[in-house]
Image: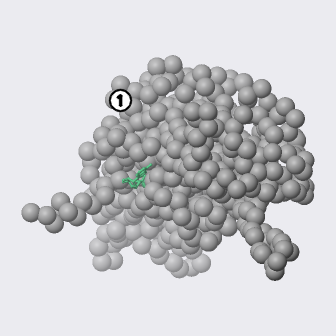
Amino acid sequence: MSIPIGAVISVMGVEVAVKAFENSNHETHFHGGKRYKGISIREFIAIEHGFREIVCTVEGEFLDEKNYETEGTIKTFTRKLKVKPIGYFEDGAFKDGIKFLPKIGDIARLLSEEQVSNIFERNTVESYIIGKLLKEELAVSLPWGRLFNSHLGIFGNTGSGKSNTLTKLYTVLFDNKIEAMGGRSKFVFLDFNGEYTGNQLASENHKRVIRLKTRTDDGDKFVLHEDEFWDAETLGILFQATANTQRPFLRRVTSGRKRFANIPNSLNTYLRKTFRNVLTSSDPNLEALELLKTLARNVTYDQGLMDSLGKVARQSGNNTSTFHHVIGPGDWRFLANDDNFYNSEFEVKLNNINLSEVSGFNELLIRSTLQVIRDVLSGSAQYDHINPLLRRIEALKSDFSRVLSVVDSVEVDPKLITVISLRECKQEVKKILPILIAKHHYEQHKAVVGSPPTTTLHLVIDEAHNILSQQSNREAESWKDYRLELFEEIVKEGRKFGVFITLASQRPADISPTIVSQLHNYFIHRLVNDRDLALLENTISTLDSVSRSQIPSLPQGACVVTGTTFDIPMLMQIDKLPANREPDSGDVQLDQIWGD
Ligand SMILES: Nc1ncnc2c1ncn2[C@@H]1O[C@H](COP(=O)(O)OP(=O)(O)OP(=O)(O)O)[C@@H](O)[C@H]1O
Ligand SMILES: [Mg+2]
C-alpha cells in the first residue's frame, strides 16, 4: 500500500472533497523504495474503496479555517482538495469511467509512477512512444491501432510544435510498421511548404516525392487519367465553376467529347462545322464571331485564318443581315450563299489545322470555346455567365499544365508514401490542386476498397487552413461549398472506407466547424486566441476544463492529447525529432546570415 495523504470528507455528485493530512504537501515522496509524486493540480490520487482503488484527478485545492476555543481563539487551517473520479483500478488494471464513488472516510493515497503510466498505457505489448507525460515525465505508449484508425487534428499557434508532432507521429509509426504495411495502405502528405521532401518520415524506398512547380517547367507532375480529367466535376474543381450555369456547361463539353471519342479527327470536324454555322448563318451573331477570332488567335495560331476572319463584317439591310467578307473597297462577298468562296477562304484553311496532337488543357480551351459558340447560337446559354469560366481556363491553363499531366494509362505507384510538395506553386494552384488530389485519392480508394475495408488511405495535411478555411471573400460561395463539402464527406464517411485524415493548423477557428468537430483525436498545442479556444471548447467533447485552461501556457512541443481513443485527456511533451528527420520549417538562421 502506498502513502495515505488524506480522507474523503464530502461527496457531492461527482465532486469529491478530501481533507489532506499534514504530510501531504511534499513535492516527492519515497515509500517502499518507490517514488511518488506529491499532490498538486492535475495529479492523480487513488481513493481506497473496498478492494478497488478509485482514481481521481486533483482539480483544485484550498484552505479551510477551523477555530479552536482554548485560551482565546486560535485559527488553524486545513488543506482540502477538490478531486474528480475518472476511473478505477481493479486487479491492477485501470478501467475508465465513473462506476464507483467514494464514501466519506475513505482514505486517499498517492499513486506510484507505475500506476500512473498504467492509466495511460494499456497496450504494453507493442509500444508506440512519441513523448512523455508533461508533469510526470513518464514515457507513455499510445494505442496506435486505435489512433490511426481515426481522424486526427493537430492544432497550435505558429512555432508551437505542430509539424514536429505530426512528423513524430508518422515517423514512429513507419519506423515500427512500414514493412508490414506494404500494399495495404497508402499515405498521402499534402505539403504546402516543402517540409517533408527530405529525409523525413521514411526512407526513399518507401517514399515518393512529387515536387510541383508552376514557375518553371522542370517540376514533377501529378498524373491524371484522361477519363478523370474529362469529367465535369474535375474540371469544375480546377476552374472553380459555379454550380448553376458553369457546371452544366462543362458537362455539355465533356459529354460532347465522349460522344465522338472514337471518330478520327472529330475535333477538327467540330471546329469546321462550328465555323460554318457561325459564318454562314442568316442570323449573324457578333459575339460568336469574336469567339472565333479568339480561338484562331489563342489556340490555332493560324495567321491565314486570322486574316480571313479579320475581313468579316456584318451587313444589314432590307430586313436581313448576314456576314460578308470584305475583299477591297466596294468588293465583298456574302458568306451565307457563296459556298465556293467560303470553302476557299475558310474551309481549306480549317482543314489544314492539325488538332490530332492537341490534348489536355489546350483541347479543353478549344472545346469549351466551340461549345460556347454553339450555346450562344442556339440561345441555350448566356455568354455572360460562361465567359468568366473561359477566361479562367485561359488564365490558368499554363500553370496547370506545368503541374498536371493527362495520360491515357496511369501506372500504379508501388510506394507506400507520397509527399506532394506545393511549395513552388502559385497561391491559386495551392488552393485548388489539393482538392483535386484529395478527391482523386479518395475516389480511387473508394472504388477498390472492400467491405469491411482491408486497405486504408491516410491523407495528411499540414497547414490545412490553406484549403479548409471557412471564410474567404475572394472566392465564390458555390466553390467554397464544394471545397468544404468534399472534406466534410471524407471526414463523415471516410472511416467506413478506411480513409482517415490528419489535419494540422494554426487556426482551428478558421476551419469549418463541421470538420473540426468530426475529428476523433486531437493534439492541441499552445493556443492563445480566444476564438480558437472557444471553438475547441464547443467542439471537442472530451476536453475537460482543467486541460483546457492549460492550453494558452503550454511550452513548445507540449500538447493536450484528447479524443475518442483516450480515456482521459493527457498532457504530453512530444519528443523532438533528430535534426536530420525533423520537418524543414525553413527557419531563418539570423546568427548565420548576419554572422561573419
Ligand atoms: N517537441 C518539441 N520539443 C522541443 N522543441 C520543439 C518541439 N517541437 C517543436 N520544437 C521547436 O519548435 C520549432 C517549431 O516547431 P514546428 O515547426 O513543429 O512548429 P509549428 O507549430 O508547425 O509551426 P508553424 O505553424 O509555423 O508551422 C522547431 O523548430 C523546434 O525547434
Ligand atoms: Mg508547421
- What's the residue at 47%, 76% (across, down)? 315
Q: Quadrant of the C terminus?
A: bottom left
Q: Which residue does the numbered mark 1 point to in the structure image?
A: 203
Which residue is at the front of the view, 66 or 429? 66
- Residue nearer the viewer, 364 or 7: 7
The residue under the point 76% across, 64% down is 78
Q: Nearer the viewer, residue 445 or 564?
A: 564
* Residue 152 visible in the shown view: no
Compared with 437, 538 (above or below) is: below
- Residue 496: quarter of image: top right
Residue 461 screen position, x and y as percent: 51, 48
Q: Amino acid at mark 1?
A: Ser
Residue at point 80% right, 48% down?
85
Q: Quadrant of ligand 1?
A: bottom left
**Up/down of 77 relative to 446, above or below:** below
Where residue 339 sits, quadrant-wise, is bottom left
Instruction: Say whether residue 485 is left or right of residue 6.
Output: left
